[in-house]
């Protein structure tokens, strides 16, 4: 509105119609602090910069990674057999002991992932080495008969993994159950983002 007013002052002949879209009003509480979540994380070798396996990625080659003793905040590491492509990492084994471990700070966690052909696959998700609590599950998370939480990967898309009750720091493990799972990137949300339908 201020921009329109200034433009009209410069050229009184200008007219403007009503905006077609109105952003929702801020619902934040007075004095609320919006903390900075972990920045977007790319998992491929081209733009990935926060993988903390010893020696980094072995680019475009099958390699068995060992989990380091410590992973810094806002960083990740791999365990097991993976192939680091420029835009994604692909799981290469049928071992259920392989995983990606991430240390993050955020309210919400989103993952771009898919499968490299074939039938849908489960990607098990745990937070602080336990299944995701019901109150912390994103809309794409389900649980199996044993209580383990997972996301069923089908086509490549963004999956809503974690919806913590508030802004928190956690360790997140993603465990593929077979070869062909492809992980592209993480994005994170804080507790000040506008509410929207995640489905």
Image (spheres, rainbow, N blue to C red):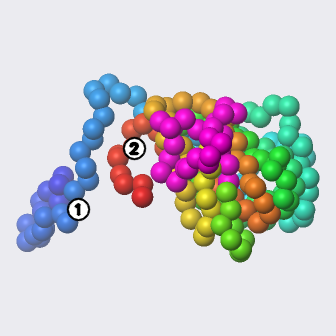
Residue projecting furthest to the bottom: 117
Residue projecting furthest to the top: 31
In the image, what residue occupies the spot 62% across and 46% down? 145
- 186 lies left or right of 20: right
Residue 193: which numbered mark, if any? 2
In the image, what residue occupies the spot 13% across and 64% down? 18
Separation of marks 2 and 1 at Cα, in angstroms:
18 Å
In the image, what residue occupies the spot 90% across and 62% down? 62
In the image, what residue occupies the spot 86% across and 36% down? 68
Front residue of 146/71: it is: 146
Secondary element under disc 2, as helix, strand or loop, is: loop
| Disc 1 crowd, CA 10 A, few/some/many (<14, 14-19, 20+) | few
Classify 6 as above or below 174.
below
Classify 189 as above or below 181.
above
Residue 124 is inside the magenta segment = yes
N-terminal of the pair, mark 2 or mark 1, is 1
Res 19 seen here: yes
Res 56 seen here: no
Q: Which range is magenta?
A: 123-148
Residue 21: which numbered mark, if any? 1
Residue 28 position within the rendered picture, expressed as x and y whole percent measured from the top left: 30, 34
């Amino acid at each position: 509105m201020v921009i329109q007013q200034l433009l009209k002052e410069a050229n009184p002949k200008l007219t403007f119609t009503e905006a077609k879209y109105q952003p929702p009003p801020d619902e934040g509480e007075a004095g609320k602090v919006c903390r900075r979540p972990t920045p977007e994380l790319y998992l491929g070798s081209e733009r990935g910069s926060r993988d903390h396996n010893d020696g980094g990625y072995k680019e475009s080659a099958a390699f068995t990674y060992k989990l380091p003793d410590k992973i810094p905040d806002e960083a990740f590491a791999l365990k097991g057999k993976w192939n680091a492509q420029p835009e994604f990492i692909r799981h290469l084994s049928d071992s259920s002991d392989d995983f990606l471990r991430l240390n993050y700070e955020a309210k919400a966690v989103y993952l771009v992932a898919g499968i490299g052909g074939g039938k849908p696959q489960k990607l098990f998700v745990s937070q602080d080495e336990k299944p995701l609590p019901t109150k912390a599950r994103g809309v794409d998370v389900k649980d199996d008969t044993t209580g383990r939480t997972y996301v069923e990967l089908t086509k490549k898309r963004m999956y809503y993994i974690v919806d913590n009750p508030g802004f928190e720091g956690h360790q997140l493990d993603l465990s593929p159950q077979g070869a062909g799972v492809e992980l592209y990137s993480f994005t994170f949300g804080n507790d000040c983002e506008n509410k929207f339908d995640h489905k």
